[in-house]
Amino acid sequence: MRKGLFLLIIGTFMLDSARAQQAVDSMRIYYPFGYRYVLPDYRTNRRELERFIGSVQEAFRKDIIERVVVRSGTSPDGMSEANERLSARRADSLEAYVVRRTGLPSELIEKRSEGIAWGMLRDRVAQSDMPYRDEILQILDHTPVWIFDDRGRIIDGRKKQLMDLRGGVPYKYMVREIFPDLRSSIAVSLYLKQTGQPVPEPKRDTLPETPAAPDHEPKPAVRAPQPTVPAVPTVSAEKPFRPLLAVKTNLLYWATVMPDFNSYTFVPNLEAEWFFADRWSLAGTGNFAKWGYGGAKWFGISSWSLEPRWWLKGDGRFRWFYLGAYGQAGDYDVQDGSTPGSGYTGNLWGAGLSFGAAIPFSDRFGLEIGIRGGYRHAQVKGYSYEAPDYFLNVETADDHWGVTGIKASVYYRFGRGSNSSK
């Protein structure tokens, strides 16, 4: 009888402890590749954030929160050390977001940076019908993250074997279909049972697939003081940098290199670009030079162009590759020095397509490389000089198909958001 009563008491205590550790609400938010900041407008983030933040605010008002656990993970693509740093930064970012939106004291938030989400990757693979699934599972189940030789040097590992398997076909599938879901942070709120408040039923559709078990005993109830200070201000670092306007200059023209790859004299030039609608921009360029060089030589050009562009990534940051279409108009005057005072002049216009890439050094500074190709029509008026007059010798036209522009431009961007987002 006493033994049975003792077991009943112990069982009741263990049941209460287990229920106190139950996650009563959770969410999963997603990130684009390489991002650390919370982006409410990405995928389903806004719906999840609003629902979860509302649950935390209600529980905080009732003073029944034991803690909020923030778990962060990344996908295997990229360098391992960089992934670990990214995972930790995402946890910091999500903690700041929760504190700002709820006023919850930071001591009630526990962060767990879990690096590469190998367990979640295995679950996704096992649930999929991807090619070579069983071979992938064999590697995930039996290959260590790192394999060392007798001298302690890394010679192989789980990621390398995944990338090498079947010529990389299954790895490319995972990069495309599975890895985006691994770039996530999970926040779980735990309520205290000691208050006597009924604990809501967990929302099954948003709980993490493989929740990590608590690694320590429940903390005593913490009665968090209600905030008496003004609301925590918005942290600007939470917003990735978004450019609005850029100014540029083409270094090749300053270095005397022209689209025909001949060298004349330096050409001052300036370009401005306006960014809008996440993946569209409009660039306007002006070039001007009219002076002598190299003794009897003379080079003059005055041209302007407009170029709408479409950026491949479409994330509102306008980096890397773009496609464009341009129109150009201007005039020129060239003397090669063979006959002093003689040369060619005329008007020109052209149109075509462009392709290039913006390579960022930081949010604001970077290098843009590009090439233009299409059609250019130019009047050709040959003239000679016999003091004190110029005489027209020939008048014709030049119709050119091919490369019409090259660039290697440095740029500076004006915009809104963080100065440090990568």
Image: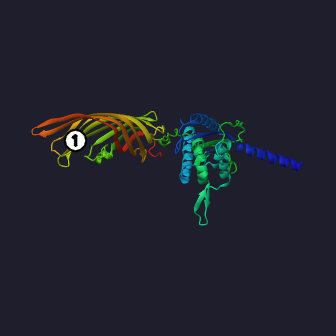
Where disc 1 sits, the SS reads strand
Scheme of image coloration: rainbow
* Left/right of residue 262 with respect to residue 365 in the rendered view: left
The x and y percentages for residue 126 are: 68, 44
**Which residue does the numbered mark 1 point to in the structure image?**
334
> Which image quarter: residue 19?
top right
Q: Residue furthest left?
A: 388
The answer to whether 157 is drawn above or below residue 210 in the figure is below
Closest to the observer, 145 or 25: 145
Task: State the residue at coordinates (46%, 46%).
Answer: 420
Residue 283 at what x, y percent from top left? 37, 36
Question: Between 72 and 299, which is closer to the camera in this rendering?
Answer: 299
Name the amino acid type tagged 1: Val
Name the quadrant containing residue 308.
top left
- The one nearer the camera, 36 or 83, is 83
Would residue 328 be visible to someone looking at this image?
no
Looking at this view, name the residue that lies furthest to the right.
Answer: 1
**Residue 303 in picture, x, y percent from top left:** 28, 36
Q: Is residue 65 left or right of residue 370?
A: right
Along the line of sight, the residue nearer the viewer: 377 or 141 = 377
Which residue, as the protein is rendered here, is positioned at the far bottom? Answer: 151
Horizontal relation, residue 378 to residue 179: left or right:
left
Percent across and percent down for residue 263 are: 27, 47
